[in-house]
Amino acid sequence: MEQQNAIKIYSDGAEINAMREMVKNDYLSGFTTNPSLMKRAGVKDYLPFAKQVVSEFPDYCVSFEVFGQTPEVMKKEAQILSSLGDHVYVKIPIMNLEGQYNTDLIHELSASGIKVNVTAITTDLQVQAALAALCPSTPAFVSLFVGRVADTGADPIEFVKNSVAMVSDFDNVETLWASTREVYNITQAAQLGVDIITVPPVILQKYNERRSFTPDDVALDTVQGFDRDIKSLGFSILDNAVTA
């Protein structure tokens, strides 16, 4: 299956069986996780889960996020997670709970050779801060939370364009479109020059099923879905009208 303009597609989740299904798609290049996804998936113990993912998918890039909120704890966690494999990126939020940038920690980790995925980025200034903190010799991602920006009612496209332009000056850094909301985001991200998009399995399933759909196919699929649900209801308007 051909990727959109060679954009790399990652699966976003923490359910191991879903991951196994997703690697059946030859376009898949990696995985991302986060604490909320791990909670939703019922992960009970972080390190056994992370080790299993790294072991089962050694050829796929994987991003694991730290849990700590102090630089000391996050640094120790990042070192542990990074040690699991060369294909592991460690997710560090751009800011802490007080709204202060984690850039000192990001710089220290990046300078030590740890591949950092700077996450929860929503503004141009945050992108600039992340890029200034990253070591030029260590691969890194900047994760743009595009869907969350759009959820505020703002148009995120200029933010994405500006981010792609800034990152283009850094050979070791890739842009990642995060918080994907719909299949069309894959096309948008590719058109805007984003390097990676991370997509929940439920949206990837739609991507697989409907990429070749025409508008008429969409309409037909919709009314067929209505018909299946009508049959499952087991009643009709006319029967109700006769007995009313």
Image: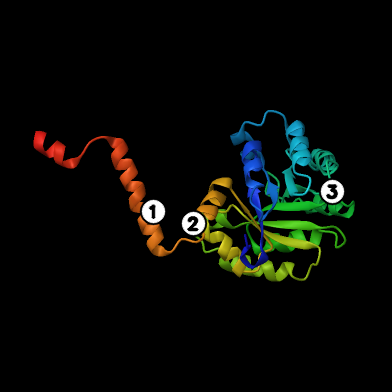
- Which class describes the residues within 10 Å of circle 1: few (<14), some (14-19), or many (20+)? some
Instruction: Say which quadrant the N terminus sits in.
Output: bottom right
Q: Position of residue 143 (x, y in %)?
A: 68, 56
For badge 2, the amino acid type reads Arg
User: In this image, 171 relative to 45: left or right?
Assistant: right
Image position, residue 186 (x, y; %): 58, 60
Q: Which of labels 1 and 3 is toward the front?
A: 1
User: Could you tell me the amino acid type at mark 3?
Assistant: Asp
Q: Amino acid at mark 1?
A: Asp
Which tag, 1 or 3, sits closer to the chain's start?
3
Q: Residue at x 38, y 63 (%)?
A: 216
- On-image quarter of the C terminus: top left
Q: CA distance from mark 2 to mark 1?
A: 10 Å
Q: Which mark is residue 221?
A: 1
- Residue at position x 88%, y 54% in the image: 111
Of the pair 37 and 230, the residue shown nearer to us = 230
Counting residues from the start of the chain, the first of labels 2 and 1 encountered is 2
Q: Is residue 158 visible?
A: yes
Q: In the image as oriented, which residue stretches furthest toward the right?
A: 112
